[in-house]
Amino acid sequence: MEKILNYINGELKSPVSGNYFENINPATGNPYSLIADSDEKDVEMAVTAAQEAFKSWSEMPVNKRSHFLLKISNLITENLERLARAETIDNGKPISLSRKVDIPRAASNFEFYATAAMHLSSEAHITHTEAVNYTLRHPMGVAGCISPWNLPLYLFSWKIAPALAAGCTVVAKPSEVTPMTAFLLSELCIKSGLPPGVLNIVHGMGTKAGAAIISHKNIPAISFTGGTKTGEWIARTAAPMFKKLSLELGGKNPNIIFADCNFELAVKTSVQAAFSNQGEICLCGSRIFIEKSLFSKFREAFVQKVKELKPGNPLNEQTRLGAIVSEQHMQKILSYIQLAKDEGGKILTGGNRIFLEGENKNGFFIEPAVIEGLAYDCRTNQEEIFGPVVTLTPFETEEEVLRYANSVVYGLSATVFTENLSRAHRIAAALHSGIVWINCWLLRDLRTPFGGMKQSGIGREGGFEALKFFMEEKNVCVKL
Ligand code: NDP
């Protein structure tokens, strides 16, 4: 079986321990490659390489650094088909999604930060006739970047690209559940001529290799995307070491449908928002609140569309709903569907594990589930499920729906459908979410601040925010 190796100091390396564990294809349930089971020894080697590379990388003129990142972006685009296939086999997502969204976005992340770095400027403050203050920004040093399994290369590159563009060197770990495209990226980095040690990728388990990155004394900045529970552990570990932290965590996002909405648009977009990537996107709208006068009409149209969404072999071009990423995650989702029933919810469609035929007969597939009849504050409506499960809840007033929407511990994103402009602005301002989409979902501009409130995280990614995160600011005051 193919071995997924570490990328340290410009070379592909076996883990020091010599140990590997199996990587499972979720659409077949079978192992298909072996992952380096790295530990603190591998992380130590990666940090040493990154520290050695830091001086020349951080002092390199920004347009030269940018050149390397553009090269990587172009190589991702040239290898789009290979990477898309790898992402789909590793994660279970439909190949159409990998081709259209995941891999092009990874290329865009490198392109965006390659060019953004050349436009970063610093401020000057004139203190009357007395002094001039200006801001210097220095790259922090070695950055630690850790990403989850749902959008593997997309989110991995969303951290690595700004860190490298800012002049940091990087030690990164992808999720052990979906490490393949990060491994392929390391091959592309070698091809691009990226200097050794600038980017180091260590594979393995979160609690071992990941934890070693978080607690390493020579990694002063950590950019993490993943679950809120892991984020809490990271915050607890990193805070006493005074590390700079960016945490992008879980969500339980509301999708609010007012009776004055564009109905066709609201139904179509709500289906996408609920079930894209099998509902495994932190931005998925998993709680749909519908104004009472529209409730039954919406429910009927929504359920009908969801029934057309059949899980299938992710490698088929026609498939729109693929496999759940792992057996463990599938069991978690199924347990939440059982909880919804126990809490008195009525399943309008889906909710069962299904077994496909042929090579997919042991794959991890769940029919998309639509549930109604639950209180807004029950566990099903409060906890992140992160799968193809959505609840429908009626409301009567703006005040009521805001109370429902804001009742969770999360505050990542929200979607609102209304044709009433004043209402749209009013609701957007009142929602406790880092991102609000009006009459759309997941429409992204990489320049905008991206991140969550409350237990959805700390800090913002995107635009210059991410570049500045990887830099230390210094004020210089010159007396006139
Ligand atoms: P996890 O928190 O389990 O894992 C995320 C990453 O952290 C993985 O690489 C994991 O490695 C690693 N990790 C786990 N434990 C530790 C540790 N103790 N120290 C360091 N690293 C560790 O999240 P999931 O991978 O299950 O991802 C799903 C979650 O991510 C959901 O909650 C989702 O909402 C959130 N998410 C948030 C986004 C946002 O932008 N806010 C975007 C996408 C997802 P390993 O896999 O090897 O355990």
Image (cartoon, rainbow, N blue to C red):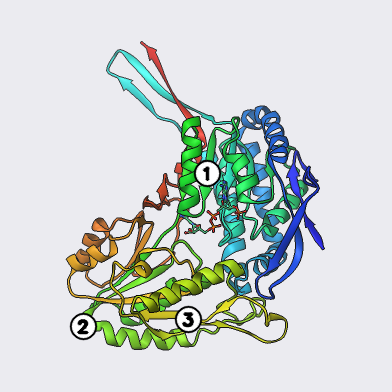
Which comes before the other along the chain, label 2 or label 1?
1
Write down the quadrant of residue 214 in the picture.
top right
Residue 171 falls left or right of residue 476: right
Circle 3: element type: loop
The spot of residue 429 in percent (x, y) is 25, 56
Circle 2: element type: helix
Which comes before the other along the chain, label 3 or label 1?
1
Determine whether label 2 and label 1 are within 8 Å by CB.
no
447 is higher (above) or lower (below) than 125: below
Q: Please name which of the two marks, 3 or 2, marks the residue nearer to the observer.
A: 3
**Mark 3: C-beta under 8 Å from nearest atom of ligand 1:** no
Q: Nearer the viewer, residue 233 or 404?
A: 233
In this view of the protein, can residue 322 be seen by the observer? yes
Q: Nearer the viewer, residue 310 or 475?
A: 310
Write down the quadrant of residue 91 in the picture.
bottom right
Determine whether label 3 and label 1 are within 8 Å by CB.
no
Residue 233 falls left or right of residue 13: left
Q: Name the residue at 60% across, 30% down.
A: 218
The spot of residue 81 in percent (x, y) is 70, 67
The spot of residue 130 in percent (x, y) is 30, 12
Q: Name the residue at 58% across, 71% down.
A: 324
Report which residue position mark 3 lands on: 351
Which comes before the other along the chain, label 3 or label 2?
2
Q: What is the residue that sits farthest to the front in this orientation?
A: 342
Circle 1: element type: strand
Q: Nearer the viewer, residue 412 or 259?
A: 412
Report which residue position mark 1 lands on: 223
Report which residue position mark 2 lands on: 293
